[in-house]
Each structure stands twice: as structure tokens, then as C-alpha cells.
Image: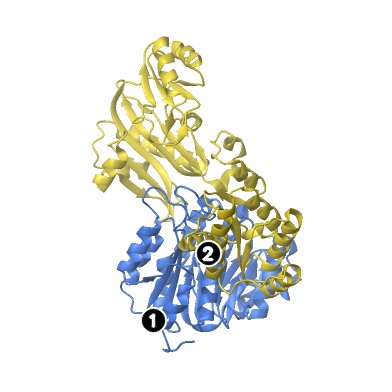
Amino acid sequence: MIVRGSDRVLVQGITGKQGTFWTERMQEYGTNVVGGVNPNKAGTVHCDVPVYASAKEAKKALNDEGGFDVSVLFIPPLGVKEAALDAIEAGAKGLVVLTEYIPVHDVMWFLAAARDAGCRVLGPNTAGSVTPGECFCGFMPAFNDNIFKPGRVGVISRSGSLGTLICLNLAQAGFGQSAFIGIGGDPIIGTTTRDALETLDVDSRTDAVVIVGEIGGTMEEAAAEYAGTMKKPIAAFIAGSAAPKGKRMGHAGAIVMGDRGTYDSKARALTAAGVTVVETPSAIGAWARESIGGRRAS
Amino acid sequence: MNFQEHAAKPLLAAAGIAVPAAKPARTPEAAAAAQKALGPVVVKAQVPTGKRGKAGGIRKADTPEQTSAAAEAILGMTIDGLRVESVLVESRADIKREFYAAVMNDPASKGPLVLFSTLGGMDIEEAAAKDASAVHRTAVDIRDGFDAKAARAMLKGLDLGDKDAQVADVLVRLYQVYRDNDAELIEINPLAVTGDGRMVALDCKFVMDDSAVKRHEELAKKGTPEKVTGLEAKGRALGLRYIELDGDVGVLANGAGLTMTTMDVVRHHGGKPANFLEIGGEAYTQAKPALELVLANPNVRSLVINFCGAFARTDVMTEGVLAALDAIKPKLPIHWSVHGTGDVEARAMLKEKLGVVPFETMDQACAAVVESARKAGGHR
């Protein structure tokens, strides 16, 4: 899912400390925030937009001007299921679920509802998405123009901080990004590495792709199958080669069990599919210069 | 959170799945006393691993003397790196057949997955590896649940003797235990058919979703606390994700991905990380206690601080680090890489307070920290 400047964005949990801080950043950057949700503050105005009791109420009130397309959730873990279902039932085309530590049964529930409704979900446990020069959703430092610049490299990342670092390395080498897609660090997420790869494959503004993966699970292996069919150059950095087995490395999804989820398995699958696997994030710049070079560099 | 057999089986019993009568014991004497009331028993090591049987952690006994001897042999054993502190003395079932049943969270279908096999027992993993079709799998829409009709459809065509209805009943109840307790995994292996035709769960493994522990506070008290070092326990008390490692390069970074990567790049340059510690998410305001934790490890000889702000603001984290440095006044070399949200303010602070200019890239900072750990190592 690539969020565009023309997308109408709702913020659930807009009045909280983080909701407020990041809504202001999103608005400054150009994200078209059309409303917020907080059942206790319905009828008020916050960050210059109306606050509604629910996403369904927001949809009703905003219907004449086009409702909303995407909802960004700044909601505590145990409230996310209900908030997400509210947004899905209100007809959201996309959700950005930032929250970490949502019970997995809740996640499976609203992902099933989203799938049936044709609603794309980024996360849970994502830092969000950035479309440089247009808009961003979540808590990404999109406004830092040493890091995010309009360009033609698409970046897919399980980690906000590491994905940001990769974008910095691209920018330092003179390459901007067409989209940053934060897919999230949880084991069960709405948009997988492969899903995001398919999106960037057909995106006419994207010439090359960087996959920022992690140990744990088999998402990179699944993405490798698709990567093998792509013409656009792809590089990958997989975090966690130095991590011990059986320990959760911060992200719930980043754990090696037995032979599953290892660095070697992912690096092998990606390499076999023709993806350049770099050993350090700093090597991304050199890869970009070699594989994309002067061809529509930014 | 893992639950040992003796903590997991009561969940099955409460849901109407038969389990053998049993009593936990921490000494051979207590085990012998438990046997008197039970008759022929199995004495089972209570450690959360599937390798108990092969390691000799499960033994039969018919008399108090045999039970005491079995417990004596098992208590204190180390199985799969885990020390056995207690045993379960369990009434011995007359086993005719062994099945396997489980329900787990499945990343591929993004929903619950029910598993069943007629090849239950110790070697199910090898059987499954040899022949994937030996384990039957049904993906469930969590909104619909898993009822008797779904269970019968799953079992159709399998040779279960005349046990189809009974197995279906166990699967439905097991699924309910999975849902009611926010399980990541619940597994019965073996699910035994006894001589008198009953279905009995002889072992149970239950892993609760860590993110759901706050919905099950009473039950969570019965879970097995994860083995942690003193410093790791300290980190948890502070709400910090700290893992102690055996190297000498201290690592402080924000975000799980960036922290792992910092460790990787330290390793890439020939160094060994002393810890994993990330202060991403809400923890970014905890830089001061976090750094104190890193420096409390006596093996740390040099330190790399790698911040790349997104949600976590690098200025707030840098302020915390400066406060910790002020309090501890450590003598070791520190190498910085700072980018992202708040980095202009953070760099200004470092310049003013420490006279430090961060490295241009984390690669350079990691190369430098490895070099200084090596030099410091020579002096100790």
C-alpha cells in the first residue's frame, strides 16, 4: 500500500500526546488529514480537524466531501481490534496500525475482516509509510530531507529505525525514494514483504527496490519467490546475523526457532532469486550507484 | 510465556478433555507419597522442552520405592539446557494408540491453524519432516471459530477406528482452550486412546501470547518465568528489552531492527557485542537507565551509541545518555552515530557538552568501537 497526497486520512486516537504530535507533523508534510476520532471528544476540533465519536460517524459526516480513504491508528493495544473493525466497517481502503503488543488473536480477527472488505493493512507494529514529497502516515521522520527525498527507489522494511537508516544511506548516495513501506515487526501482519514487493513492481514511479528484512519467520523466503520474476533491480539487508538462537530480538517476529527464520536461509533464498544481499547498511549506496547508476538517479 | 505440563493440563481438564490423575513433587519422598494414591505411574520431568522422553526424563514406576528412585534420578537432571526442579507423578494410562493434536497462530494464513496426526508420540516432528501429509492442517477464520462440523470435515477419511466423534470433540474443546487463553500454541502429544476406549491427553504444551498476558493475569502467575540473568531481570523491571551476550562491545540503539543491525555490523568488523538493548517505541525516554544497564556489565570495554530517530527522538535519547554519563562518569571510549528525528538538536548537545562530533555513518562508528575494545582489552 502506497499512501498518496490525494488520499483522505483519518486519525483514530488523534487527541493523545503521540496522536497530536504526529498528526501535526503529518499535516505540515502534506498529508491530507480530514478528521480524527475520540469517543470522549466528539464534536470538538483538534489539530484543525473535526473529532468524531467513531470512524463510522466520521464517514457519515464527511461523506459529501469524500469520506476518508486511510485511517492511522494511535490506539493502545487492547483497543485496536475494536477501532480497526470500526474503520473497516466504515469502508476504509487502508489502515496503518502502529501499535506494538496487540494480542495476536485480536490481530488475526481484524486482518480477516480487512481481507473480506478489501482493506489493505500496514502493520501492526509499523512506524508507517512515507511517500517523499507527498505525505506520510505514522511516526516516520519524513520531514528530515537528509533522509527522505523524492526519488525512484522503493523501500520495504520490517523496522522503522533500520528502514530510516537505509533511506539515509540511499540519500547520502544521491538516491531518493518513491515510497517507504513499513510493514511492521510482528509475526502476523497485514502486508507482507511479498505483498509490498508486488506493489512496487507495478508502481510506475519505482525503478528499484530495497528489502529491509530481519531474522524470524519465512517472509523473506516467500518474497524471494516473487523477486525472481521481477525485472527491477533489488537489494536486501537482513538484520540479525549476529543474534543468538531462540531469543526474541526486540520485535516479536524476530526469533530464530531451530532452522526456521535464520539469516542464512533468507540470504540464500534471496541471492538465488537474483537479489543483491548486502552485509552492512552502508553498502546500499554502492549498490544503488552500480545497479541504478545515472539512470533516472533521483 | 511457556507453561509446563502440570500448569497446562488443568486448562484441558477444565474444558472437558480427560487428563490422568497426577501430583507434582519436588523431592523423591513427595513423589513416593503421591504414587501410593495413584497406583502404577509415570514420573515426568517438568521442564518446558519436548526432549524429555529421549533424555530419560520420563520413567515408569509401580511401587513407592521405584517412584522414589525414578524421582531421585530425574530431579537435578539437565535437559535441553534446563535443570529439572520438579517432577509430575502421573497415573499410568493403558495406551492403545497415540494421536497428535494442536492449535497455533499461523503467520501464513494469518489465522488459527488446527493440526492433527494419527502419528502421535515422541517422533511426530521427524514423521512430519519425512511426510508432510502425515500432519493434517485446517486454517480457521477466527471470526467463525472451529465447531464439530469443521472438526469432522478435517478428520474425514482418516482411520481412527471408531474414535472419529471422540477425536472431533477433543479438537473442538482444544480450539476453545486456545481461544479462551490467548494461546500462541496449545498442543496435546500424545492424545492417547486407552484400553477402555477413552481419549486422554497424556502431555500438553501451552504457550501464551506475551502480548495477551495482561488479559490473563491470574493464569500468567502459573507460567514458567523465562530464565534471565541479573542484568536482564533489572532491564525487565525497567521495561527495557535487554539481552546479555558474551562480548565486550556495549551497544545502545533505538528500535529492534537498528539494534540488531548494530550488533551485526560490530560483528562484521570483528568485534563481539556485549548486549542487545533497544530503547525504541515508548522506551526512548529511558536512555539514562538503559545506559546504566549497559555499563553495569563488567565485560564492556567500549561503547557504540547508534540512534536513528523515527518515533524515538534522538534529542530526547541523547539528553538521557548525557545524564547517565554525568552520573556514572565512565572511563570507556564511546562512539556515536546520530541521525533522524531531532538529530540537529542532538548533535548540538553533543558538541556543547562533550565536544563530540558523531561519525558520518554507523559503519564507521562500529569499526571504531571494535578497534577501541581491542585496545582497551590489552590493558586489562
Query: What whole-number distance in Å separates the C-alpha atoms at marks 2 and 1?
Result: 24 Å
Chain identity of mark 2: A
Type of the residue with mark 1:
Ser
The x and y percentages for residue B78 are: 44, 31
Label number found at residue A159? 2
Asked if B356 appears above or below B185 in the picture, the reply is below
Label number found at residue A291? 1
Residue positioned 30% across, 24% down in the render: B95
> Quick one: which residue is furthest to the front in this view?
B379
The image quarter in which residue B79 lies: top left
Asked if B369 appears above or below B298 in the picture, the reply is below
What color is chain A drawn in? blue
The image quarter in which residue A88 lies: bottom right
In this view of the protein, can residue A44 be seen by the observer?
A: no
In this view of the protein, can residue B95 be seen by the observer?
A: yes
Q: Which chain did the renderer colour yellow?
A: B
Asked if B298 appears above or below B2 in the picture, the reply is below
Residue positioned 30% across, 31% down in the render: B98
The x and y percentages for residue B153 are: 31, 45
Q: Earlier in the sequence, mark 2 or mark 1?
A: 2
The x and y percentages for residue B106 are: 41, 52
Residue positioned 41% across, 48% down in the render: A257
Which residue occupies the foreground of this view, B50 or A104?
A: B50
Of badges 2 and 1, the one in the foreground is 1
Chain identity of mark 1: A
Type of the residue with mark 2:
Ser
